[in-house]
């Protein structure tokens, strides 16, 4: 599955992407804000990521930015199963922070989620990563009012995580946000 946004091509990861993926994510400042990525992030982790099978209802995309040399991997974004339902996750390589790519790519994934029939998407951010909270609010996610401990593989410990929810249809009128 592929999706095109204004500046990005969201596409599946291929084995030949392992080096570019490793070059973008092997940064402690990125991994510490992710729940499922280990630290230190090693080349074999990137190879495992690009080789894994994905559920078509839970797409995972590399964010790529076309340029004069082709297309450059700048991050990843996707949907995954979580105890609260379908969860949005993303990361951006450090040189691309603050340029709106996370918001743009996540908005594209939410368009795909609607097409796949998902009604509600959850997300969260560690409290010491307020930039991710700003991205979620720009996308229309609403804070649930809950902060829970969530394990971060990169940190090796539970870290306070603020929870958010977004309804992609009329579910907001049917079921108010639970605190």
Image (cartoon, helix red, strand yellow):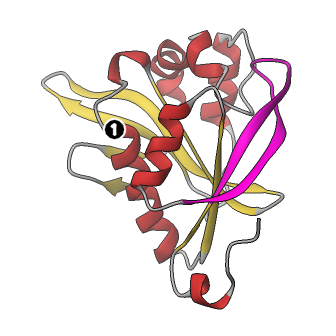
Magenta span main SS: strand
Regarding mark 1 in the picture, which secondary structure is present there? helix
Q: Quadrant of residue 66?
A: top left
Q: Residue furthest left?
A: 68
Q: Which residue is mark 1?
A: 101
Which part of the image, by quadrant, shows the C terminus?
bottom right
Of residue 102 and residue 65, the one placed in the foreground of this image is 102
Q: Is residue 13 visible?
A: no
Q: Residue at x 29, y 54 (%)?
A: 4
Residue 87 position within the rendered picture, expressed as x and y whole percent measured from the top left: 66, 56
Q: Residue at x 33, y 28 (%)?
A: 98
Q: Is residue 96 left or right of residue 160?
A: left
Residue 122 position within the rendered picture, expressed as x and y whole percent measured from the top left: 65, 59
Residue 169 position within the rendered picture, expressed as x and y whole percent measured from the top left: 51, 83
Q: Is residue 146 left or right of residue 165?
A: right
Asked if residue 145 is among those painted magenta in the image, a careful observer would answer yes
Task: Examine the rendered structure and indicate whether residue 69 appears above or below residue 57.
Answer: above
Q: Quadrant of residue 112?
A: bottom left
Of residue 2 and residue 132, the one placed in the foreground of this image is 132
Q: Is residue 174 left or right of residue 95?
A: right
**Dot 1 alpha-carbon crowd within 10 angstroms: few under 14, some 14 to 19, many 20 or more:** many
Q: Is residue 163 left or right of residue 110?
A: right
Asked if residue 155 is among those painted magenta in the image, a careful observer would answer yes
Q: Residue at x 45, y 31 (%)?
A: 75
Numbered circles on residues, count: 1
Q: Residue at x 73, y 33 (%)?
A: 35
Task: Examine the rendered structure and indicate whether residue 72 appears above or below residue 83.
Answer: above
Q: Is residue 172 visible?
A: yes
Q: Quadrant of residue 40?
A: top right
In the image, the segment drawn in magenta is 142-164
């Amino acid at each position: 599955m592929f999706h095109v946004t204004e500046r990005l091509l969201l596409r599946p990861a291929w084995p030949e992407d392992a080096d570019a993926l490793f070059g973008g994510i092997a940064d402690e400042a990125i991994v510490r804000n992710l729940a499922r990525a280990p630290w230190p992030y090693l080349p074999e982790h990137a190879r495992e990521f690009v080789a894994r099978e994905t559920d078509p209802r839970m797409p995972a995309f590399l964010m790529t930015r076309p340029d004069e040399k082709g297309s450059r991997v700048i991050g990843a974004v996707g949907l995954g199963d979580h105890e609260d339902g379908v969860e949005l996750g993303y990361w951006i390589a450090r040189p691309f922070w603050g340029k709106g790519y996370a918001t743009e790519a996540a908005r594209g994934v939410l368009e795909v989620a609607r097409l796949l029939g998902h009604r509600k998407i959850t997300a969260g951010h560690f409290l010491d990563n307020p930039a991710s909270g700003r991205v979620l609010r720009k996308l229309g996610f609403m804070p649930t009012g809950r902060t829970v401990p969530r394990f971060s593989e990169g940190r090796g410990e539970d870290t306070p995580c603020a929870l958010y929810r977004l309804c992609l249809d009329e579910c907001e009128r049917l079921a108010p946000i639970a605190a």
